[in-house]
């Protein structure tokens, strides 16, 4: 595995773990009566989906990550 592949796997793992934490946080907020818990849960689900996409399709995901970084660097986001 190349360094780029390893970095991609680290990004995927971090995204999935962060998504799980966000979903758990949203569930906890819902139980305690928090009114705005759904955006946190939705963000967590998107993070889990992104991490899964990175693991399932590494070539397409690498292109997606590079394209997003290029947009962020040029201030287009």
Image: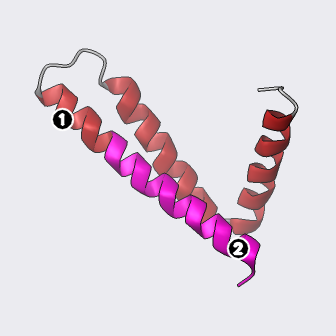
Q: Which mark is residue 65?
A: none
In the picture shown, does residue 73 fall above or below 16?
above
- Magenta stretch, main secondary structure, is helix
Instruction: Tell me the quarter of the picture where residue 25 sits.
Output: top left
**Which residue is depicted at the point 47% across and 51% down?**
48
- Which residue sits furthest top? 35
Q: Secondary structure at mark 2?
A: helix
Q: Position of residue 36 (x, y in %)?
A: 31, 17
Q: Which residues are magenta?
A: 1-22
Instruction: Tell me the quarter of the picture where residue 43 sits.
Output: top left
Residue 20 relative to residue 47: left or right? left
Residue 3 relative to residue 31: left or right? right
Q: Position of residue 31 (x, y in %)?
A: 12, 29
- Whether residue 14 can be seen here: yes
Where does label 1 land, which residue?
28
Q: Which mark is residue 5?
A: 2
Q: CA distance from mark 1 to mark 2?
A: 35 Å
């Amino acid at each position: 595995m190349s360094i780029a592949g390893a970095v991609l796997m680290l990004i995927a793992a971090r995204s999935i773990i962060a998504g799980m934490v966000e979903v758990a946080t949203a569930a906890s907020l819902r139980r305690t009566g928090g009114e705005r818990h759904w955006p946190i849960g939705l963000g967590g689900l998107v993070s889990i989906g992104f991490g899964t996409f990175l693991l399932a399709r590494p070539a397409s995901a690498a292109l997606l990550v590079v394209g997003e970084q290029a947009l962020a660097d040029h201030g287009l986001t």
